[in-house]
Amino acid sequence: MIYKTLGNSDLKISSICLGSMTWGEQNTEAEGHEQLDYAVAQGINFIDTAEMYPVFPKSETYGLTEKCLGSWLHKRQCRDKVIIATKVVGPGLNGAHIRGGSRFDRKNIQFAIEGSLKRLQTDYIDLYQLHWPDRNVNIFGKLNYQHDENEKATPLLETLSALAELVQAGKVRYIGVSNETPWGVMTLLKLAEQHNLPRIVSIQNPYNLLNRSYELNLAEISHRERISLLAYSPLAFGVLTGKYLNGQQPSGARLTLFPQFERYAKSEQGTKAIEAYVNLAQKYGLAPAQMALAYVNTRPFMTSNIIGATTMAQLKSNIDSLHTVLSDEILAELEAIHTQYIFPCP
């Protein structure tokens, strides 16, 4: 396993992170524990979760993923051996079961952290992240940003100050963001410097062969400001495996169960790009999933690649992507496909 420093923190995290969004919905607690045992045995020390997991989020399953991780931590008594990241839900989920509709104000953040600590059965969170901004931004495939001067958003200074209280109280070690924009990242860094508040150390945004928008401007911020990219959806909700091509809907697969996530599979350009990537992998005798993950693993601005799986076979294959070497020839052909189908699925 390869370990990298998380931002400007003192944490060394594995370059493969175990994602958990299926535990409590597609996976049972026992299966979640099995995944954790195997991942840790392979050298993974970084686990990512969120208060709203599992997905698709609903009141009946809210918090089950954190509870699964918490019961494993209690059972294995290994809290000091792993680095736990979780997230506080932002507004816009339409989930009245989450604090009646969450904002990133002090009250909501204080309430959220206590719930996560209880479910995780721990006294502290290593990395506490804002799940998405408390303002209108282009995320989850949305384009054509529409500015609203009158929108009601929690000021970033108020949010950062609330997070600072958690750090000062010892409940959180470091803070980060997710689904954030360049403006949001740089504003948070400026506020931290101006008001002597904690500096964010990471950003968890999508990055995969179909969605390389991170490269446009956030990649430079990662390098110059030491903001670690924690890449999520490296297989684009599984479509880069090729299993959804030709109209296939595998039983139990995420897009079969939750068509709400089909943005990576519904565009004509996206489908053509997927076919091209799958054909390229087969040309070189590679599993399409391992090729796609290996590409993410090699990006110089990437710190940890968040993988997820519903079966142990998938988990083992995903972790093994660390050993997949992409030749200069393959990388050149990957770039040629990207140039042909540039940003097919933002």
Image: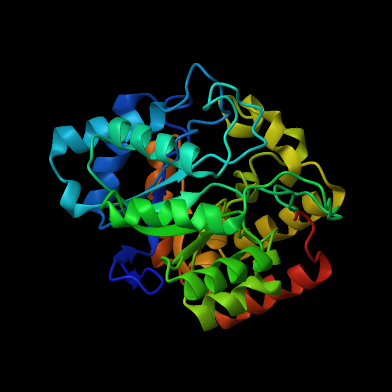
Residue 140, horizontal then vertical, whole percent: 70, 47
Indicate the quadrant where residue 56 lies.
top right
State the residue at coordinates (39%, 66%). 323
**Is the C terminus in the top left, top right, bottom left or bottom right quadrant?**
bottom right
Q: Say whether residue 50 is left or right of residue 338.
A: left
**101, 15: nearer the viewer:** 101
Q: Say whether residue 187 is left or right of residue 341.
A: left
Coloration of the structure image: rainbow
The answer to whether any part of residue 227 appears in the image is no
State the residue at coordinates (60%, 29%). 101
**Is the N terminus in the top left, top right, bottom left or bottom right quadrant?**
bottom left
Could you tell me how many numbered marks the image carries? 0
State the residue at coordinates (15%, 45%). 78
**38, 17: nearer the viewer:** 17
Residue 211, horizontal then vertical, whole percent: 69, 59
Question: Is the residue 145 above or below the residue 20 in the image?
Answer: below
Residue 324, horizontal then vertical, whole percent: 45, 66
The answer to whether any part of residue 323 appears in the image is yes
Question: Is the residue 100 above or below the residue 231 in the image?
Answer: above
Residue found farthest to the left? 77
State the residue at coordinates (58%, 82%). 328
Residue 61, horizontal then vertical, whole percent: 47, 21
Question: Is the residue 52 above or below the residue 196 in the image?
Answer: above
Q: Say whether residue 247 is left or right of residue 240.
A: right
Question: Is the residue 280 above or below the residue 298 in the image?
Answer: above
Residue found farthest to the top? 60
